[in-house]
Image (spheres, rainbow, N blue to C red):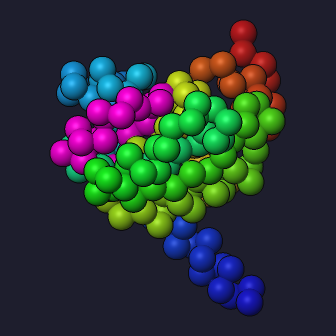
């Protein structure tokens, strides 16, 4: 059993290394996607991050090569919207990992996100309401799963949308408060 866990951990690390290999790109240049996905960023060529996409976004994302959408918003934040049905209707795969506010920014949720990313074929969009929780979990996972040190992971999280949750991420990573 320990051997299988070790093999699984290596597989996740290898898969995520390819997700993290490219240097961060600040924002996406496609204006149709920028207007339909707030705070859209492309940390690398396999990963898009941002805020809550509008219902028209899925066709633009699919045209850009996105195959999977990972939603970090809990159902109570979705205002009755059936995002899963919208995404599937556009021909994309859908996964939801509910992350409720700062309390949901945990290493367990970061591991769940990194595992989902490693299992997703092709390009992935990960979103929450603004991109902040996305960046937070990617930063935490970068240390736990991606082999980055805490400072590198924090910078990766910021490139992916981390803003207001930075104090929580710094605390978990054992970094001093920002100046």
Q: Position of residue 105 (x, y in %)?
A: 73, 39
Residue 150 in the image: above or below residue 16: above
Query: What residue sits 64% from the left and 41% below the top?
Result: 75
Q: Position of residue 141 (x, y in %)?
A: 63, 49
Task: Report the side of 4 relative to 59 (left or right).
Answer: right
Q: How many marks?
A: 0
Query: What residue sits 68% from the left and 88% below the top?
Result: 3
One can see residue 85 in this view: yes
Q: Position of residue 60 (x, y in %)?
A: 23, 38
Query: For the C terminus, which image quadrant?
Result: top right
In the image, the segment drawn in magenta is: 46-63
Q: Residue extending furthest front?
A: 80
For the residue pair 153 and 164, the one nearer the viewer reads as: 164
Q: Position of residue 11 (x, y in %)?
A: 52, 73
Task: Report the side of 11 relative to 179 (left or right).
Answer: left
Q: Quadrant of residue 54?
A: top left
Query: What residue sits 38% from the left and 46% below the top?
Result: 86
**Is 84 covered by the magenta stretch?**
no
One can see residue 154 in this view: no
Task: Report the side of 177 relative to 135 (left or right).
Answer: right
Query: For the N terminus, which image quadrant?
Result: bottom right
């Amino acid at each position: 059993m320990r051997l299988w866990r070790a093999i699984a951990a290596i597989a996740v690390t290898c898969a995520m290394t390819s997700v993290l290999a490219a240097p961060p790109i600040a924002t996406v240049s496609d204006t149709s996607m920028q207007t339909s996905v707030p705070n859209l960023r492309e940390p690398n060529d396999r990963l898009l991050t941002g805020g809550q996409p509008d219902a028209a976004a899925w066709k633009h994302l699919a045209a850009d090569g996105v195959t999977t959408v990972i939603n970090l918003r809990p159902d109570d934040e979705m205002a009755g919207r059936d995002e899963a049905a919208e995404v599937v209707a556009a021909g994309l795969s859908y996964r939801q990992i509910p992350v409720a506010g700062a309390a949901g920014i945990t290493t367990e949720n970061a591991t769940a996100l990194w595992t989902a990313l490693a299992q997703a074929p092709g390009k992935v969009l990960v979103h929450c309401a603004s991109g902040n929780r996305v960046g937070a979990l990617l930063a935490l996972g970068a240390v736990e799963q991606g082999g980055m040190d805490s400072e590198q992971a924090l910078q990766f999280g910021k490139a992916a949308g981390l803003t207001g949750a930075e104090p929580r991420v710094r605390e978990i990573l054992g970094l001093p408060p920002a100046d």
